[in-house]
Image (tube, rainbow, N blue to C red):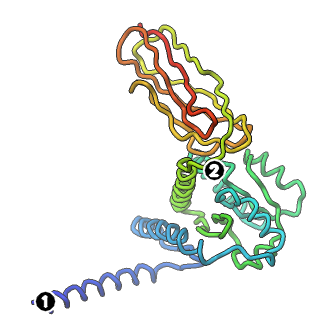
């Protein structure tokens, strides 16, 4: 009886392998970028394939594709310097790449501002014009870092792709999570950005929980919020906070003295001199006077910062 079960299991496994091979045979794998017939089953298959590939790259390429040493020249040093405090998402394109493709990627990136911060994106461009970076900033409203590089620098590393712009991640040790977008299937790029957003979220979560973070200073625009005479309707307001110190500011936790005040906090570090907002959602449960406290915990010399939320519900 056991032998029959063993034979049955083997037949099932062989069948699964044959199905996978048949699916893969309909795809053209070019530099880890699949090409396929555009029906619903293929799209689902390749989206899952890309999803698994991105997660695999995160573990595999990070250990195998190291930054070249001093032989990497100027560019290697620049990338190492940019990533010394954390990973970056690099968007690589040049004047030889499809302009329509570049525009499409910027539009998709705009939709992921809550997951991937502009400060975590670096544009690696190759343009003959010295004013290229300035024009790109203006055309795409990009405020992050831009490096106008010699194409040969990347060609030496064997990672340059022809014809299409592409993305990759980099930290102080390695380059990984390479991705070439499919022009006709933005859903794959969306999947990629979601994965990258998760990677950044994990990095910043670890940093927030680090008890050895250097202290900085935080300035709160309003510490006393007077809502005066309001109705029982839900009200939302924001409080501006600024990093007035010399180190990145991490908001570790925000708590309130009652369940009626729900706040949304920045997940990313606030760099020195920069500002962000804490969103407060107030849902009064009953009429009368109220006096609540919202407490902000961060890597500052003060243990916590208090915002008072007071008023009257008619």
Q: Relative to 191, say whether 22 is above or below.
A: below
The quadrant holding residue 307 is top right
- Dot 2 surroundings within 10 Å: few (below 14), some, or many (20 or more)? few
Query: In the picture, which quadrant includes the C terminus?
Result: top left
Whether tag 2 and tag 1 are in contact, CB under 8 A, the answer is no
The residue labelled by disc 1 is 2
Viewer-nearest residue: 97 or 235: 235
* Residue drawn at x 19%, y 87% as measured from the top left: 8
Query: In the picture, which quadrant includes the N terminus?
Result: bottom left
Viewer-nearest residue: 247 or 270: 247
Determine whether, in the image, residue 138 is placed left or right of residue 209. right
* Residue drawn at x 68%, y 35% as measured from the top left: 217
The quadrant holding residue 224 is top right
State how many labels appear. 2
* Residue drawn at x 53%, y 71% as measured from the top left: 59
Tell me residue 253's x, y (percent).
51, 38
Pick whichever of labels 2 and 1 is earlier in the sequence: 1
The residue labelled by disc 2 is 107
- Dot 1 surroundings within 10 Å: few (below 14), some, or many (20 or more)? few
Q: Between marks 2 and 1, how big is the CA–CA gap?
A: 58 Å
Tag of residue 265: none
* Residue drawn at x 74%, y 41% as measured from the top left: 246
Which of the two discs, 2 and 1, sits closer to the camera? 1
| Residue 273 visible here | yes
Which residue sits furthest right?
130
Tell me residue 251's x, y (percent).
57, 39
């Amino acid at each position: 009886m056991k032998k029959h079960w063993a034979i049955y299991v083997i037949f099932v496994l062989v069948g699964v392998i044959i199905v996978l091979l048949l699916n893969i045979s309909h795809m053209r794998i070019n530099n880890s970028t699949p090409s396929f017939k555009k029906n619903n089953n293929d799209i689902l298959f390749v989206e899952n394939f890309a999803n698994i590939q991105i997660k695999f790259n995160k573990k595999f390429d990070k250990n195998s594709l190291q930054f070249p040493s001093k032989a990497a020249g100027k560019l290697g040093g620049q990338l190492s310097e940019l990533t010394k405090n954390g990973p970056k998402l690099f968007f690589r394109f040049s004047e030889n790449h499809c302009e329509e493709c570049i525009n499409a990627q910027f539009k998709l990136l705009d939709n992921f501002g809550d997951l991937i911060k502009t400060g975590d994106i670096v544009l690696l461009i190759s343009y003959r014009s010295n004013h290229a970076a300035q024009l790109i900033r203006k055309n795409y409203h990009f405020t992050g870092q831009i490096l106008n590089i010699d194409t040969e620098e990347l060609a030496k590393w064997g990672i340059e792709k022809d014809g299409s712009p592409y993305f990759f991640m980099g930290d102080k040790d390695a380059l990984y999570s390479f991705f070439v977008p499919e022009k006709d299937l933005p859903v794959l790029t969306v999947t990629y950005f979601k994965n990258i957003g998760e990677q950044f979220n994990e990095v910043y979560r670890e940093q927030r929980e680090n008890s050895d973070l250097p202290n900085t200073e935080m300035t709160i625009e309003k510490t006393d919020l007077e809502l005066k005479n309001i109705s029982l309707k839900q009200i939302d307001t924001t409080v501006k906070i600024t990093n007035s110190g010399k180190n990145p500011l991490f908001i570790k936790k925000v708590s309130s003295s009652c369940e009626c005040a729900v706040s949304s906090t920045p997940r990313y570090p606030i760099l020195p001199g920069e500002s962000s907002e804490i969103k407060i959602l107030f849902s009064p449960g009953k009429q009368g006077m109220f006096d609540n406290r919202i407490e902000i915990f961060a890597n500052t010399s003060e243990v916590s910062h208090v915002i008072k939320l007071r008023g009257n519900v008619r």
